[in-house]
Amino acid sequence: MTDIITALLLIIGGIFGFVASVGIIRLPDTLIRMHAATKAGALGSGLIFLGLAFFSKAPGTTLRALAAVFFLLLTAPVAAHLIGRAAYCSRVNLWHKTWIDEFANVCDWCQTGQRTDHADECRLKETLVDGGKREHKNGKAEKEN
């Protein structure tokens, strides 16, 4: 029975790993590819480690495999978020069908005004941060009504 459960965990983990690799190849932009790699890749690797933990008779190997699953599930979402944010802030082009841009006001280029296609979101951030104050070319801040 142990062999059957181990085989199922390894096969399902391998399928999720395969789905992650297909997602990396087939999906259109960096952020969507990263999502596929993180979610399916972490689940596939976690299932393979669980298969190892279930199969192993030694408690040390089982504990190491369970610790690997724990740290994988702990670090994969954080790493994916940071990689995605770095890719976005370095101006990697989004897919042409992406129409919601919730990250437009968090990068440094928003303050410098370098990205003109998100000028409205940058103005919105100015309004929210300054409480309605905008600095004009002469350097004076005026309160907007």
Image (spheres, rainbow, N blue to C red):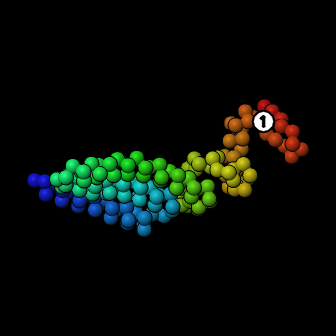
Which residue type carries mark 1? Answer: Lys
Residue at the bottom extreme of this rendering: 25
Disc 1 packing (10 Å; few <14; some 14–19; many ≥20) = some
User: Is residue 10 rendered to the left or right of residue 71?
Assistant: left
Task: Measuring from the top left, give residue 84's x and y in whole percent.
Answer: 52, 55
Residue 102 in the image: x percent, y percent? 57, 47
Q: Quadrant of the C terminus?
A: top right
Q: How many marks?
A: 1
| Residue that sits furthest to the right in the current view | 138
Q: Quadrant of residue 35?
A: bottom left
Asked if 142 appears above or below 71 in the picture, the reply is above
Side of 63 relative to 112 (left or right): left
Comparing 60 with 32, the one in front is: 60
Q: Residue at x 32, y 48 (%)?
A: 67
Left or right of residue 103: residue 21: left
- Residue drawn at the location 64% of the way across and 50% of the way down: 107
- Nearest the camera: 28 or 112? 112
141 w.r.t. 22: above or below? above
Query: Who is closer to the viewer here, 45 or 122?
Result: 45
Can the viewer see residue 137 in this picture? yes
- Residue 59 pos. (x, y %): 21, 49
Q: Name the residue: 23% across, 59% down.
A: 10
Q: Position of residue 113 (x, y in %)?
A: 74, 52
Q: Nearer the viewer, residue 91 or 62?
A: 62
Where disc 1 sits, the SS reads strand
Residue sitting at x 59%, y 61%: 92
Residue 50 in view in this figure? no
Q: Which residue is mark 1?
A: 133
